[in-house]
Image: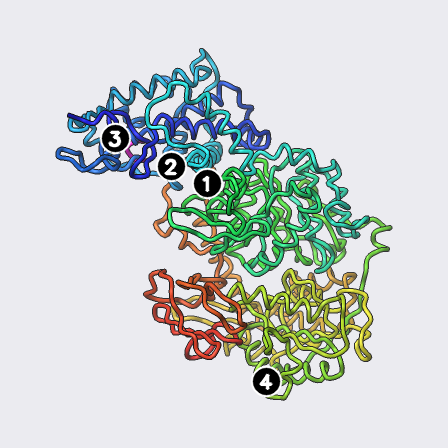
Amino acid sequence: MADGRWTEPWGKTDGEETHHLAHHSADVAACFKALVRLPVIRDRLCRAAGRSLTMVDLARLAVLVFLHDAGKLHPGFQAKGWPEAHGLPPRHGHLAEGAAIFLRGEPPGIAASLYLDDLISWGLDPDLLMAVIGHHGEPVPSESRAMDHWDPVPAMGYDPVAAAVVMGRMIARWFPEAFVAGGDRLPGRPAFAHLFCGLVSLADWLGSTRAAFPFVSRLDPDYLLRVDVTARDIVTAVGLDVSALRSLVPDDGGFSLFSGRDRPRPQQSLIGRHSLEDRLLILEADTGSGKTEAALWRFFQLFAAGKVDGLYFALPTRAAAAQLHGRVQAALRRMFADDAPEAVLALPGYLVAGEHRGQALPGWEVHWDDDDGRAEGALLRRWAAEHGKRRLAATVAVGTVDQAMLAAMQVRHAHLRAASLARSLLVIDEVHASDRYMTEVQSHLLSLHLGWGGHALLMSAPLGSVARGRWLGQGAVPAVDEARAAPYPALWGGKASVPVGLAPADQARLTSKAVSMVEIPRWSAETAAGLALEAARAGGRVLVIRNTVAAAVATFAAGRAAGGTSLLLTVAGGPALHHSRCAPEDRALLDRAVETALSPEGRVPGGVIVIGTQTLEQSLDIDADRLITDLCPVDVLLQRLGRLHRHPLSRPDGFFDPVCQVLCPEGGLERLLTSGMENGLGILRRKNGDLVGVYRDLSVLELTRRLILTHPCWRIPDMNRLLVESATHETPIDALHQDLGAAWKKNRSDVIGRDVADAGGGRAIVLPVQTPLASLRFPGDGERIRTRLGAEGARIDFAQPVVGPFGTAISGVTLPGHWTPGTWNGDELSPEVREGALRMTVGTLVLGYDRNGLTKHNGLS
């Protein structure tokens, strides 16, 4: 005789207990209802729909959400939770099976019981159906076998038609508003279906949270009445309902509250005075001018006005994100005191919420460093932090731009990410650092985000007019003289064709500096080290920024060989340098050491040398007496100059005035037209036809070099616009080609061709929200689709933390993007430890890790 407990369908099980399918469906529908009660989410959904949504619309959408797991009625799915017995059907999934019910209307008894005719009369179409059925992260392809094996299973007493009848009764009982006569057809815009899909996924994640929705195996006809309240509670607990927080923020954004300063800086005032109706802004300002605080101010203003419910701060690198996270959390603490939300660090391999860290446990559980004895409800506030796919749903999150880009790409859970992000202010910092592939994907992300009513702020050092026009969607590029005349610092809005410059009073308050620019016509490691040692021995704090890790490591070695070890940056009792190929835990040590060595406060007499790469340009509050840098494009060079004489400080003799020594290749750049890439400049042509390089456009580099010669004193920021346009605008580039000949023009054509290919690659994999969802199929590569070209690659996790070269326990390392580990299957590793250095084999790579950072066994690459 059949066990009576298997006659009712289950929706969730842990192998012992079960949760009735109608209950789980109600959990998810209730969470959807709670989400769309929130004004910001409701606004985004209405914008995507192209009209207001009525209570009848929302009730009918909730019915669709309730049916998201209807395919679980299939006996082959139910069998996954049954004890083994004779006569069980073949195993089935539930996604294609659910699609078959509503697309084909079969089995007829099930489709009729689930109100298929009513759904069709409401406007159910394949797109809305796919939005519901695709809640596991991607569109669901049809499967012919989904129609098979729907027969009753006498051995278990289970009849799918009878189960569907009961589900149908609950629909009529729990959603009576959906069945009123009349009402408009549900929205049919593709963009609406895409956003709805993401909200269904978000509701499913929430409704699957067992801490909020404990299992109830036997059907309770009044179940939804209870879980409607529970759903509203969990939406508040996890930080999606921020109404209580919003009441704590002054209407003007409370600048003095979160910043701790009475008066904003001139560049910050541009943000503070700007209309909240302008949903896309670009803030151009120098490093150290307070762009981070400006972004926070914009967030708090929009938050207070009820236009956003969250913030995602996107940085170019993991290290920059990790460093900024603490600053953002401190600002939240100043604004909200004990009610402050915990900023989530949205990085792969990290479990960080506010000041607390978590450790992943089996079964998707997380142990937090402060959760001993705390109530489960108190830990729900870290729900978004506990899973990488949910982090964009945090009230405040800081992470890499890659994580935001995944919301706009054809990868699993893109819709979840995009819908979660839609409620937040999206801040993308250092957009000047984006290559064409990244720019294409980020531009699509902005289009998607703004199209749903979202808000975005892009921040940059001075952008060339060509790049800025691309971000703003402006086709025409101004003439070079007009471009040079544009104000700087400036705020550009999506609704205006002209920028907002500083008011005269703010312009008068602007801090400026006159930097002596010196070309050094050689750039060997010995040259760089020699210049640095000379300045440090004279008492200066010296910053050396090389274009590549290889050059930085070689300069570090040259400095030690020349007897300068005592002058080099010291970490854990020994010399160190700063670049991206270090474990995250060590990068935190290095960041703190650099900020101490080049701190604007508490400076003690004596020279010091900090050697590193582009990582020293990003998000570190450092102030050098002397800057030594490789030649790089003018906008990047201006970014580096932001670390030189950043504050008005007392300086050692000989360093009263800022000096930047720019290392250039011996013999000039012309030889790189044919010899390939050197120290990051030029193009390396790979056998597969790819053109790689850090700074590939030799024309821009040559114009930058000439600016150093023709303008030996750069007045910052007064000359920034002149400098950038003089090296990046097409008019001076064309003039350079006329002067130097066809080989230079060919190099630029090759670069542009590569950029066009990169842009095409970006367009090919973006999430097409104007394409009907039912016709969309994601590529099979999933998240292997590159979110950026040539940057951070695979994360190598260690089986157990090991003590690294700086004396701290490290949990893993991240490979550069162009280091391919071959046959490595993603397993955790146990590196050998030899005299403070690590050695490990990752697929086909043999790697070492010591004070120089991560290296290949046969040297750096």
Residue type at mark 3 is His
Label 4: few (<14), some (14–19) or many (≥20) C-alpha neighbours in 10 Å: many
The image quarter in which residue 577 lies: bottom right
**Farthest residue, direction bottom:** 562
Would you name the residue on which mark 2 appears? 134
Residue 97 magenta-highlighted? yes
Label 1: few (<14), some (14–19) or many (≥20) C-alpha neighbours in 10 Å: many
Compute the Cα span from label 4 to label 3: 70 Å
- Which comes sooner in the sequence, label 1 or label 3? 3
Residue type at mark 4 is Ala
Kind of element beneath mark 4: helix
Q: Which residues are magenta?
A: 95-99
Residue 558, disc: 4
Task: Say if 232 sits above or below 518 in the image.
Answer: above
Task: Say if 855 sits above or below 299 in the image.
Answer: below
Residue 74, disc: 3
